[in-house]
Image (tube, rainbow, N blue to C red):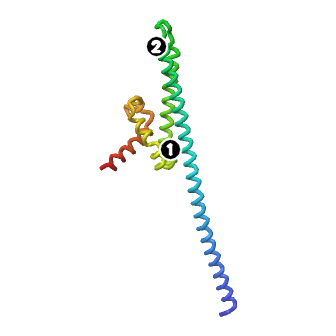
């Protein structure tokens, strides 16, 4: 074997070693990138879930405040003479109450949209909101917002309800 052939073999071996180390480095980098992406995804899910809870709580508090004002107003009107005409104020309060309820339902509907689009941890979302959503849809007070279903503006909320109750029926068989 000549010196030239030995040099070619050594250079080839070094090239092969370099290629192997490059592949190993790329694999390690890829793995750490995937881990970092998974951590970022979980952090994002957590932020989205906190934002959802804040939005729902805020809308719920607003709804409760308006309902309390409306109830207080109706109590004060019933104790007054029939001569006093406060229908304008009462209509304004009823409008505010309807708006507050719709904003509250929109908050749940938006959250269900994120659930449907896989933008959050579905298992944790179901654990956190299952009872709230089931009770909300079944509540006769809000029936006019969901029935008839084809006219409802809250179709994402209805879809999640159906998915969960369908799974419930299937699991019980």
- The relative height of residue 95 versus residue 146 in the rendered view (above or below) is above
Give the class, few, some or many, for how many residues have Cα within 10 Å of label 1's Cα (few <14, many ≥20). Answer: some
Looking at the image, the residue that sits furthest to the top is: 83
How far apart are the two marked residues, 1 and 2, measured between alpha carbons?
44 Å
**Residue 36 x %, y %:** 60, 58
Does 119 sit left or right of 151 as displayed?
A: right
Quadrant holding the N terminus: bottom right
SS of the residue at dot 1? helix
Q: Is residue 98 left or right of residue 27?
A: left
Per the rendering, the mark at residue 114 is: 1
Q: Residue furthest bottom?
A: 1
Residue, disc 2: 78
Left or right: 68 with respect to 14? left
Residue 26 image point, x, y percent: 61, 67
99 above or below 53? Answer: above
Q: Nearer the viewer, residue 79 or 117?
A: 79
Query: CB atoms at circles 1 and 2 under 8 Å apart?
Result: no
Query: Closer to the camera, 148 or 75?
Result: 75
Q: Quadrant of residue 132?
A: top left
């Amino acid at each position: 074997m000549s010196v030239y052939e030995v040099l070619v073999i050594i250079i080839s071996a070094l090239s092969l070693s370099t290629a192997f180390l490059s592949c190993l480095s790329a694999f390690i980098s890829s793995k750490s990138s995937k881990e970092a992406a998974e951590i970022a995804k979980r952090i994002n899910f957590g932020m989205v879930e906190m934002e959802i809870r804040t939005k729902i709580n805020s809308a719920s508090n607003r709804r409760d405040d308006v309902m309390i004002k409306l109830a207080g107003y109706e109590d004060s009107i019933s104790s007054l003479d029939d001569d006093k005409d406060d229908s304008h104020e009462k209509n304004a309060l009823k409008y505010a109450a309807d708006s507050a309820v719709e904003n509250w339902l929109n908050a749940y509907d938006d959250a269900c949209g994120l659930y449907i689009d896989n933008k959050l941890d579905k298992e944790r979302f179901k654990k956190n909101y299952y009872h709230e959503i089931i009770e909300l849809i079944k509540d006769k007070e809000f029936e006019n917002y969901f029935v008839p279903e084809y006219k409802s503006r809250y179709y994402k909320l209805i879809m999640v309800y159906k998915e969960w109750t369908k799974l419930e029926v299937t699991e019980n068989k």
